[in-house]
Amino acid sequence: MSLKLADVWRAGTTRLLLIYGGLFALWSVALIGVIQWNTTQYLSNVVDLKLDNLSRYYMTLDRARLREAIAVTKALDLRDVLTQGMFDESGHWLAGNLAQIPAELPLDGKVHLLERGVQRVEGHHPVRARGISVRLASGELLVLTRNTSVVDAVGALIGGAALWGLPLIVIPGLIGALLLSRHPLRRVREMETAVEPIRRGDLRKRLPVSPRRDELDLLAGIVNRILDEIERLMGEVKGVCDNIAHDLRTPLTRLRAQLHRLQHETPADDPRAGLIDATIADADALLDRFRALLRISELEDLHRRAGFDDVDLGATLKHVGEIYAPLAEDKQIAFTLETPESLPRLRGDPHLVFEAVSNLVDNAIKFTPPQGRVHVLTTLSALGPRVDVIDNGPGIDAVDRNAVVQRFYRSASAHAEAGHGLGLAIVAAIVKLHRFRLEITECGGGGAKVSLLCWTAPD
């Protein structure tokens, strides 16, 4: 069973993992940022302390020893991180390797960050540094700077670690979300497949439950218990209705037999003869209704599929045409039957398929006025054969098309014709049993088009 990527992204497991991964990534970024900031501050404070201590030491020396100390310090600066300069009151260079006083360095005796760097006498490119400027007792200016290469390198190292760490957090999170969401989605697809027969009326089916007893299993268990109760209630209702129809059919049959006997014993000129005939007709109508109800109940038993056989649809349609063509001719209706030369065999009950097509044709002839037409058209598609019963009668309104397949429902246009509202209900039960499809539409020139799509729907 294939899983769509869109379904994976919509899964609750995926969302939870992505939210957790996003929060973890944000927390990691914040943590690394705090570490980087604290480390930078610590190293900067170390640099500041060294510069401050060095400046204090230089201020204790006289002018001659100060120049010597600057030279010694430069010689000892093996990593070349320290830049020093001595300037007169006008800012002219006197000693050291600092070419000029940085413009962004205040003369306040405190350490400041020099973003634009300092320029050395040797002519190197300006480098970012931290510096301090103090005024000596002689009035001269002493400027000490130390580049921030170590601080910057540590910051870059931590930043690079963050850039590498984020993909290492996000990518495994995405992969984990995809992998962990596949099993719940597969379970949901299995439940969807199991629900389809239930949706079609097979209340014996149940949702699958795994040994894991997770949230989906708890939900499936709840649904299965609901289905148990629905099946029990539906069985009770169906049993009551079937028992009523069956029990009433026997006294009605006895009543009809007595009326029939009374009809033969009553002279034709007796005023009661017409009343007896009308009563017999009413009893026959009631018996027809009970037979139809029991027929629908019988068709709704899906166990009948076990007795399915091959059905020759072409022969069935030909048989229907032979029966109903004379009836249409008596009503002055043009009846035509159009089928391909060869039709594939269907899997089903031959008698029920014949009954379904017969009911559709019978309805079409019943509701088509004289001089009208009824056309039975069979076509083949990639899925299977399609039987369209088309007439130019009053048609079936769009609002009634779902209701006409229910028991006893009769649309406003059908009240003028005799019937019980059970013909299409029987067709619907046969279609459901065979897992076919029934479509009711309007044909081009008015009237109804009822289509029997003879291809089996998937379980």
Image (cartoon, rainbow, N blue to C red):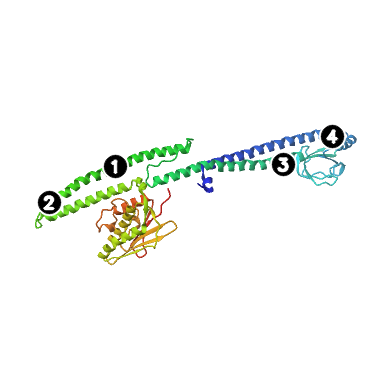
Q: Position of residue 351 (x, y in %)?
A: 32, 53
As measured in the structure, the alpha-carbon distance from the residue carrying label 2 to the one carrying label 1 is 35 Å
As measured in the structure, the alpha-carbon distance from the residue carrying label 4 to the one carrying label 3 is 33 Å
The answer to which of marks 4 and 3 sits earlier in the sequence is 4
Q: Count up the numbered dots.
A: 4
As measured in the structure, the alpha-carbon distance from the residue carrying label 3 to the one carrying label 1 is 81 Å
Q: Secondary structure at mark 3?
A: helix
Q: Is residue 326 left or right of residue 7?
A: left
Could you tell me which residue is drawn at 45 percent across and 36 percent down? Answer: 218
Q: Can residue 8 be seen at all in this image of the molecule?
A: yes
Residue under circle 4? 58
The answer to which of marks 2 and 1 sits earlier in the sequence is 1
Q: Are marks 3 and 1 in contact (CB under 8 Å)?
A: no
Q: Is residue 34 left or right of residue 354?
A: right
User: Nearer the viewer's eye, disc 3 or disc 2?
Assistant: 2
Residue under circle 3? 156
Q: Amino acid at mark 2?
A: Leu
Q: Position of residue 97 (x, y in %)?
A: 85, 42
